[in-house]
Image: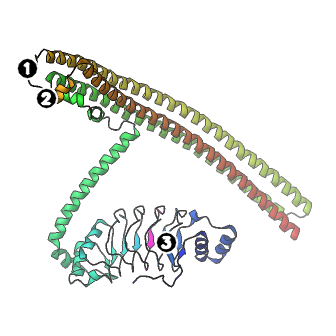
Amino acid sequence: MSQSYNSIEPNVIDDEMLQKAIEEQHPEDIRKLAKMEGVDFKDVTELQLSFRNILQIGNLWQFENLTKLQLDNNIIEKIEALESLVHLVWLDLSFNNIEVIEGLDTLVKLQDLSLYNNRISKIEQMDTLQELQIFSIGKNNLTTLEDVIYLRRFKKLRTLNLAGNPLCNEEQYLLFVVGHLPELVYLDFKLVSDTTREGAVSKYRDSTELLEQEEAQALAQLEEKQAKQKEMEYHQAAFVEYLNGSFLFDRMFAEDMEAATLAHFPEVDELLQEYRKEFVSACENLFNFGLKEYEKREAEVSEFYQSLDEVLTASQQEGRKIILDFENENKKSLDEILAAGSYDIADSKRAECREDICQLSEVLMTLEIEVADQMEELIKQFKGNIAVIVSTFIENVKELMTQCRDLENRYHEKLLEMSILVLEKSARNELGEDLPADVQKLLVDKNTIVNALNVSHSIRLRMIDMRESDILISTYHWQASVTEKASQNEIERNRERVKEIVQYVDRLQEELDNIEILDMME
């Protein structure tokens, strides 16, 4: 079933093997060019590494645009190092020594997967492969029909091969598989007939209806979880996560034993509830303000890139027109050189062409300078607008967080007053009830209770300060990131455009020089 390497020297996937494989799968002319200049692995979309005694998958991270990968007929023991191949559509790992399905999480575009003839005993860890249409896992060690139920999650699965597994010997194998996977078109290389499908669906209707209910419930839970995750990401992008409720307040009092102890007294508990209400209201005001400011930031960024696109589009259109007009005239000039009656006339025409090419270069470079100036001005305006938006946001955050601190200070002052009053009543035996041990421990003397409450107060203030600091740091980081990205993108765009112009002009000069060489040879 599987491959042995006791008598085979295992290989690793190194650059030499990859280069050779790429050369072998290309036509002769491309192969020669690849040998001379090498191949950029990023440009490769299909790679065949069959029959190479590969023991371990590795060194494929550069093939980021790969769509088809053949690793069949090797001695691979583990599925690994495929996480960067996110565009993979077709993967063949048949005829290896794989025991566990794993390492496929990032291959979300995979449509065709072959694990035929390995040592796999369970179908698992494939949840992310929602595009899967063809799955071959025949000649493995699958023993239980219930394994097939796992495949119900793949709604696009139409072709399945299980032939050669022990589970195929079960009497109800065919009906069980088709009954639980009614959308299958081909099973074990055979077309599923309508008669078989109807019989299978009827036989297993009760169990599949129960499965459908469970799947619907699981799907609802997943959608709810995803919606909450999306909402949380939105709040995080606005820098106000967990401010739409009592989360910060609850954290501040989560380990405040003194506050919990003093809440034994009704007036203290009433004070705490009033503080909670006002504090949560302040947090929600900050939360709602943060979401509005996030939308403003996003709108500003979107408008900025739209402006850039408009400038670039206009420039590209003008550049294309200049080049088209030039190439029409240049073709006429080249034809005139070829048709020249004497060397002197041809030489004169060539000189004119060279001058035209130089003028074209100047025109294109001038156009690029104008574009670069426009882009620089747009970026400058963008940075200014972002600075204003950030400044406004920061100013309001500080103001709202100051409100939170004021609420905390006011609560602390009133709590001190109440606690000292309770202490005095306790000393005069005026409380009229037996106090719990933790309350008695706190009401020893004025210094004890004041020190304890001051420590708790400091901790709560520090939590407010830390939350404010988190918002400010995230905001400044976003500002630096978004403005730096705009500047860096323009630097790279300008560099690439200048490079394009230089290469284009060089190609024109080369074409002209080739005509001169041919003319001299004649």
The three-letter code of the residue at mark 3 reads Gln
Q: Secondary structure at mark 2?
A: loop
**421 shown above or below 72:** above
Task: From the viewer's perspective, tell me whether residue 201 is left or right of residue 119.
Answer: left
Viewer-closest of 458 and 133: 458
Q: Are marks 2 and 3 in contact (CB under 8 Å)?
A: no
Q: Residue at x 39, y 80 (%)?
A: 117
| Number of the label disc, if any, that sits on residue 2 | none
Residue at the far left in the pictured view: 432
Kindly identify which residue carries mark 2.
Answer: 436
Bounds of the magenta segment: 85-99
- How far across and how far down the image is residue 351, in percent? 85, 54
Residue 7 shows in this picture: yes
Residue 432's disc is 1
Alpha carbon separation for disc pair 2 and 3: 67 Å
Mark 2 / mark 3, whichever is N-terminal: 3
Which image quadrant is residue 411 in?
A: top left
